[in-house]
Image (spheres, rainbow, N blue to C red):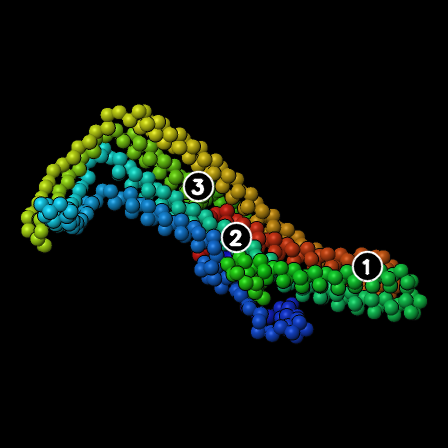
Amino acid sequence: MRDNTVVVHCFTKAGMLFMLFFILQGCLTGLPVYAQEVLKWQQCVSEALQARPDLAAAEASLHQAEAQKKITASVERPQVNASLSGKRSDSTQEKLDSNSTFSYSVSASQLLYDGGVTGSKVDASKETLNAEEQAFRLVSSEARLSLRRAFVELLKTQKLVVLAKEIEERRRENVEFLKLRYEAGREHIGSLRRSEADLAEAEFEVAQAERGVVLAQSQLSSALGRDERSSLIAEGSFAVEGFSEKAPDFTTLAKGHPEVLQFEASTRAARYEHEASKKSLSPELSLNSSFGRSSFENWPPDELDWSAGFELSLPLYTGGGTEAAAAKALGAVNEQISKSRGVYLEVLDTLEERWKNVRDAAENLKVQEKYLESANLRSTIANAQYSNGLISFDDWVIIEDNLVSSKKSHLNAQAQLFVARAEWTQAKGVGLNE
């Protein structure tokens, strides 16, 4: 299932309670209700693509690589220069007259042969650009995971507020019920005090959940790339579709991962740089030509000057620098090969681990659903039994605590599955805009 299918199609009872909570919160705090900004997942993606600083930095690095490729390739093209000069000279000696010189010219040169040095450097710049493109994909993938975690965390804390208020109301009803039994002489003061302590804990958890919402809102604002903190509401649900139990082809996924492709491109770039360093002892041949006009005293100049020829240069001895440069480039190739292999193995391990985590989280959610169903049923039966004196307070409160615990565990299991799926998506290298 794709992440962007997580939307709310209808208002459930919990959803209505949640919206009511935020409306009441706005009234109590004096904040206008319209200050709450409701965001769906796809809206978050669109905003993050434009505002996240890590994506902007990666894009700037990509543009630099594109410019460097053009700079390297420009050596193969003709180089044309124009010049204009004017000069006036004079002397304090009376016998010497002043004179002026004017000239303008255009010169051009074209590299014909350099042993393939420039061609290898151009190929290296292309692979460097390819590596930067993969690096951008990698940053985009990590940005997606960061944003997804923040979105799910806000969604979970919102639901936790609703759940905490439900538990608080249930605890309050239990206190009233215990007061009646205590006043009727059917329960001792210790049971009433325990029930009151449970209510105090529930009230604390409501306040704690509300503070958690504020923190999650701030974290989502940062994940969106916003400088200012915003009062946000994440709109979505934890409903999920089935996940295939068949293990995917981890090898194929790892080979297509942007980090693996990035290091492979860097390895190829290092090979081309090594080739260029080996070819640097080759002769270099280029054509040169120029034409222009010059004259003394007169403007515009009327005397035509031109020249054409070739230039051949051959390095004979560089003091060992060329050989050392080639050896250094070979070392860089070997380094990139080893790093590339190491990255591939790491990505392969991560894929297998993240897929396992998704399977575990999906099965754990099914288990927690069964626990919640049984806890609800046991609570209904226990309430009737305790009212009729068929079970003790200690047995009844254990069942009540178990229901509260099951509800929290079920909510955590839902959020854990969504985070696990987001981590699996990131492990495959899926970008924010994919």
List the residue tagged with mark 1. 397
In the image, farthest residue toward the left: 303
Q: Residue at x 49, y 41 (%)?
A: 347
Residue 145: which numbered mark, if any? Answer: 2
Q: CA distance from mark 2 to mark 3?
A: 18 Å
Residue type for callout 3: Val
388 left or right of 248?
right
Q: CA distance from mark 2 to mark 1?
A: 41 Å
Q: Amino acid at mark 1?
A: Val
Residue 370 visible within the image: no
- 403 w.r.t. 304: above or below: below
* The C terminus lies in quadrant: bottom left
Q: Nearer the viewer, residue 98 or 295?
A: 98
- Mark 2 and mark 3 lie on one chain; the one further toward the N terminus is 2
What percent of the width, then of the height, locates residue 299? 10, 54
Residue 293: x, y in percent? 9, 49
Q: Give the Cα distance between marks 1 and 3.
A: 55 Å
* Badge 2 vs badge 3, beta-carbon distance below 8 Å: no
